[in-house]
Amino acid sequence: MTTWSLVVALALVSGASAFRIGAGAFGRPRTARSNGRTVSMSAASVGFQKFHGLGNDFILVDNRDSKEPKLTPEQAAAMCDRNFGIGGDGVIFALPGDAIKMESGEADYTMRIYNSDGTEPEMCGNGIRCMAKYLDVLEGETHAGKTYTISTGAGPIVPVMSESGSVTVDMGCPILEGPVVPTTLAPTMDGEQVVNAPISVAGQDWEVTCVSMGNPHAIVFVDDVDALDLAGVGPQFETAPEFPAKINTEFVQVMSPTHLKMKVWERGAGPTLACGTGACALTVAAILAGKTSERTCTVSLPGGDLVIEWREENNRIYMTGPADYVFEGEYKL
């Protein structure tokens, strides 16, 4: 059976103080601290830190010494198990900047991520904010305006640290061409855009707008998101044949022109408390579908709020939100 030992820091919401428990006191392997890193003291274990972005929680692993993740997808899935592992929506590996080749420029780091089911998505919006905070720990410094260029499967992403502790991320330009998202749904607008397209899922008729943020999203606008049977409908959207790479699905209620409320079923993870790329995609979808004309919106997710801005002058999307440290330790493989 997999066992793990923790060096836990239970930070108060205010961040004013923390309480630590040394796992070594209970007869399990200790971890050492070096320049803010957790260093494994057992060859068959891996050090980690856990962060969350609005409850979307990730296990962060220092992988700077290798261009490939040091864990298998199966090991990552076991770590994410909330009963027999650490618990998380995914494992994020901080790799060297040249682990994924970029078409232009150089990256400071590379992000690879395994979902809780072992699949690998292109990137993750909440995860990229958590990784930025983790990189601050690894480098041992942070200050307002500090940036990282992170190479991902969706292209280069640049998070910027703020004085308030939140992270603003340039998420790039949305991809709107249906076949590229990808979806086999027939385009409903010029440029092969799939906006308010009819689809039948789970025995019901819906309208979806499809957007990619480097990973695929289907956005469905509903009158009452709290009344939605997410567990019943979400999995059937994820595996619908109209989405050949499977799909992340956001169900959205328009509260006002600048306030959107959503629930998400994530591809490979199921229901989560937050999805950063989904918040970006649904803001774009709300504008395309005529639900709002405002290009800056507060998106309320089950775990909290994100501010999303789709700038008209450069077509790029900017996401601002928190990322918080939870605890750290050593996981025995």
Image (cartoon, helix red, strand yellow):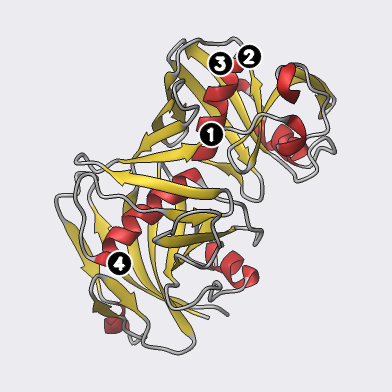
Report the residue marked by disc 4.
138
Please state the horizontal and vertical placement of residue 210, each as a whole percent of the image.
68, 28
The amino acid on which the numbered mark 2 sits, given as a three-letter code, is Ala
Comparing marks 1 and 4, which lies closer to the viewer? 1
Residue 196, above or below 269: above
- Which quadrant of the structure image shows residue 17? bottom left
Of the pair 34 and 302, the residue shown nearer to us: 34
Q: Earlier in the sequence, mark 4 or mark 3?
A: 4
> Which of the 4 quarters of the picture holds residue 64?
bottom left
Badge 2 crowding class, 10 Å Cα cut-off, few under 14, some 14 to 19, many 20 or more, is some
Would you name the residue on which mark 2 appears?
289
Residue pictured at 63% horizontal, 14% vertical: 289
Distance from disc 4 to disc 2, alpha carbons, whole Å, reads 42 Å
Q: Can residue 193 be seen in this view?
A: no
> Secondary structure under badge 2?
loop
- Circle 1 — which element? loop
Left or right relative to 301: residue 142: left
Do the numbered discs 3 and 2 sit on residues whose CB atoms are within 8 Å? yes
Placement of the N terminus among the 4 image quadrants = bottom right
The residue type indicated by label 1 comes to Cys
- Alpha carbon separation for disc pair 4 and 3: 39 Å
Mark nearer the N terminus (4 vs 2): 4
**In the rendered structure, are the residues bearing label 4 and label 2 in contact, judged by CB atoms less than 8 Å apart?**
no
The residue that mark 3 highlights is 287
Q: Distance between the residues labelled 1 and 3?
A: 14 Å
List the single residue furthest toward the front: 104
Q: Which amino acid type corresponds to the residue marked 4 in the rendered image?
A: Leu
